[in-house]
Image: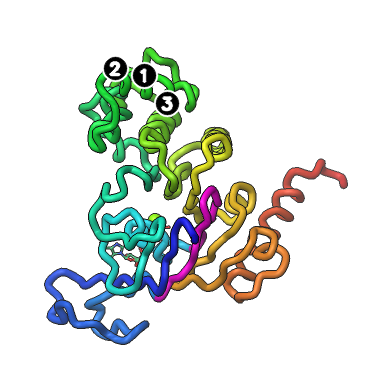
Amino acid sequence: MALLSVQDLVVRFHRRGSSKGGLRLPFGKDRDGASVLAVNRASFELEAGEVLGLVGESGSGKTTVTRCILGILAPSSGQIRFQGQEIQSRPGLHGGRIQSVFQDPMTSLNPRMSILEIVEEPLRIHRLGNAPARRRKVEQLLQSVALPADFLDRRPAELSTGQRQRVAIARALATDPCLLIADEPTSSLDASLRVYILESLQALQQQQGFAMILVTHDLPVARCYCKRIAVMLRGEIVEIGSAQEIFEAPRHDYTRQLVALVGSHAKEKRKKDAPSGL
Ligand SMILES: Nc1ncnc2c1ncn2[C@@H]1O[C@H](COP(=O)(O)OP(=O)(O)OP(=O)(O)O)[C@@H](O)[C@H]1O
Ligand SMILES: [Mg+2]
């Protein structure tokens, strides 16, 4: 049995004040601009311990899919099963077994809380351990993301962006999740930090064995860190396959365009980097 199974997921947002109310329009039809079909019959499965890349242009529906998996958003139709049980739209329903890291650590961390309180919070929410045990766990978690223990009393504003993102990762791993959803976890970071955070996530994933959905618009990042890649276009998963299949034998036109774009960027870069006179 798959760890996660998403079947025919549909999410349609209705604009506030729309006269259509809850009325469903046929797929792809948005005649009066009153609704947006953000996810259109998306289906995929994820095995325990597997890393799946979810790629696609801005607005293609990646975050919306993950919000449904997290139980933050109720789908219009379709089914999501986690460990065989249907996910309902109530965050935290899974006892912390699904956790997430978002793009911007500044907005995802409460500025008034100390790092100890932030990382400890999921343990308190899920009533895991007493205060001394929770503190020990937080210290271990900070160590696992290479942050010194004396950061415990600091507030997010006293940390660099990269350090904040490591706090967000420590917090997400506090409840020993089976599935981590990382939604563009490095897009607010500079290039060297990006690699550092992605490699830290990969090392933690390999040590702890949780499954991961890595949302990114960067296909080379997905190739580097994910075993399988799902490609989204205008709400649909148009292609899903191993990273090798996606790069070496893309089947959908859009995937072919994405792969070609990566190739031409790489060529441009090689030309730029080549010593003059060659
Ligand atoms: N709460 C909402 N209300 C109305 N429309 C929404 C809402 N959330 C998302 N949308 C719309 O749904 C579509 C998909 O958005 P989503 O955030 O899932 O895209 P994305 O692939 O994550 O994009 P990005 O790469 O920019 O993060 C977009 O057209 C977006 O405007
Ligand atoms: Mg998004």
Q: How far apart are marks 3 and 2 (CA)?
A: 14 Å
Q: Position of residue 235 (x, y in %)?
A: 41, 71
Q: How many labels does the image show?
A: 3
Amino acid identity at mark 3: Leu
Q: Where is residue 242 in the image (x, y as percent from the top left)?
A: 64, 61
Q: Mark 3 points at which residue?
A: 141
Q: Mark 1 points at which residue?
A: 136
Assess whether residue 51 is covered by the magenta stretch.
yes
Mark 2, residues whose alpha carbon is within 10 Å: few (<14), some, or many (≥20)?
few
Secondary structure mostly seen in the magenta stretch: strand
For label 1, the SS is helix
For label 2, the SS is helix
Is residue 52 or residue 111 the one in the foreground?
Answer: 52
Assess whether residue 72 is covered by the magenta stretch.
no
Callout 2 touching callout 1 (CB < 8 Å)? yes
Residue 50 visible: yes
Amino acid identity at mark 1: Arg
Using the rendered view, name the quadrant where residue 20 is placed. Answer: bottom left
Is residue 49 or residue 120 the one in the foreground?
Answer: 49
Choose the circle earlier in sequence order: 3 or 1.
Answer: 1
* Residue plotted at (42% across, 66% down): 6
Using the rendered view, name the quadrant where residue 176 is placed. Answer: top left
* Residue plotted at (51% across, 51% down): 48
Residue 24 relative to residue 206: left or right = left
Q: Distance between the residues labelled 3 and 1?
A: 9 Å
Q: Name the residue under label 2.
A: 132
Residue 41 relative to residue 251: left or right = left
Q: Give the range drawn in magenta.
A: 41-56
Is residue 171 or residue 184 the one in the foreground?
Answer: 171
